[in-house]
């Protein structure tokens, strides 16, 4: 199952299964050192980041690749919601003549096939990026048991991509989300969207995981990125 489908399938339920995403979206906005007027957001989802913006804005462009998420995002005359995959040329064409005070992105850019290329193009249209990305250490124990590789970028690739075009501050945080029982924990994995297309373990693997996973929590590692200046 592609990442896109994973998010679309659970778009309505997503609100109840994205606790970590909600925490990081809130932190992302809280950490801003000024109140930007023109904002581009990548991976806007149903509007978690936008919901924390409490000041007057001139223009907000919100991008997400899931049409069902875009439908849920708040709309207004100064908000433009567009459905794009940010790895495509169409997206780059869409933003190339724009200019923003800041680019925000919460729990989305870790899916990029070419993060460095995106950052390069963003450097043409803004001086500041504040982003938070999940790293490949998310669900680390699960990967160990199932001998699978994370579908998302690792911490050093993320740092490298941003550091090519900006001087940055990085902070990596490990969150643990606890569950009352195993069934609840496994349901969460399926519906949280963090694992992307990676929940399709075959029956044998799933059974092995269910048997051997003895933690009562899931691991989520996120990296907060703040650009300081362009290189």
Image (spheres, rainbow, N blue to C red):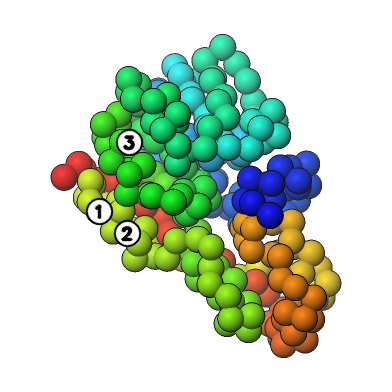
Furthest residue in direction top, as rendered: 77
Please identify the quarter of the rendering in which residue 83 is found.
top right
**Which dot marks residue 159?**
2
CB atoms of marks 2 and 1 within 8 Å: yes
Residue at x 77%, y 81% (from the top left corner): 204
Per the image, the residue denoted by label 3 is 122
Q: Position of residue 31 (x, y in %)?
A: 42, 46
Front one among 5 and 73: 5
Furthest residue in direction left, as rendered: 231
Per the image, the residue denoted by label 1 is 163
- How many other residues sit within 10 Å of disc 3, few (<14), some (14-19) or many (≥20)? many
Q: Position of residue 134 (x, y in %)?
A: 50, 59
Instruction: Name the element at disc 3.
Output: helix
Q: Is residue 103 above or below residue 144?
A: above
Front one among 20 and 189: 189
> In whole angstroms, how far apart are the C-alphas of marks 2 and 3?
15 Å
Instruction: Name the element at disc 1.
Output: helix
Instruction: Name the element at disc 2.
Output: helix
> In whole angstroms, how far apart are the C-alphas of marks 1 and 3?
13 Å
Residue at x 69%, y 64% (from the top left corner): 199
Q: Position of residue 164 (x, y in %)?
A: 23, 51
In what quadrant of the picture does the N terminus appear?
bottom right
- The answer to which of marks 2 and 3 sits earlier in the sequence is 3
Q: Is residue 10 above or below residue 190?
A: above
> In whole angstroms, how far apart are the C-alphas of marks 2 and 1?
6 Å
């Amino acid at each position: 199952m592609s990442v896109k489908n994973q998010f679309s399938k659970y778009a309505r339920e997503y609100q109840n299964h994205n606790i970590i995403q909600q925490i990081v979206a809130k932190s992302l906005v809280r950490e801003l050192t000024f109140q930007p007027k023109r904002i581009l957001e990548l991976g806007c989802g149903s509007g978690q980041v936008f919901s924390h913006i409490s000041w007057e804005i001139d223009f907000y462009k919100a991008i997400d690749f899931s049409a069902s998420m875009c439908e849920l995002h708040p709309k207004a005359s100064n908000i433009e919601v567009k459905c794009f995959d940010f790895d495509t040329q169409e997206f780059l064409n869409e933003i190339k003549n724009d200019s923003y005070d800041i680019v925000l992105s919460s729990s989305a850019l870790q899916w990029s096939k070419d993060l460095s290329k995106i950052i390069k193009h963003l450097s043409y249209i803004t001086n500041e990026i504040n982003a938070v990305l999940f790293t490949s250490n998310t669900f680390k124990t699960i990967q160990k048991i199932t001998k699978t590789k994370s579908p998302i970028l690792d911490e050093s690739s993320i740092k490298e991509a941003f550091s090519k075009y900006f001087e940055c501050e990085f902070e990596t945080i490990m969150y643990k989300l606890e569950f009352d029982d195993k069934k609840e924990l496994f349901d969460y994995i399926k519906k949280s969207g963090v694992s992307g297309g990676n929940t399709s373990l075959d029956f044998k693997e799933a059974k092995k995981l269910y048997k051997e996973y003895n933690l009562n929590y899931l691991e989520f590692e996120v990296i907060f990125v703040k650009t300081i200046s362009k290189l």
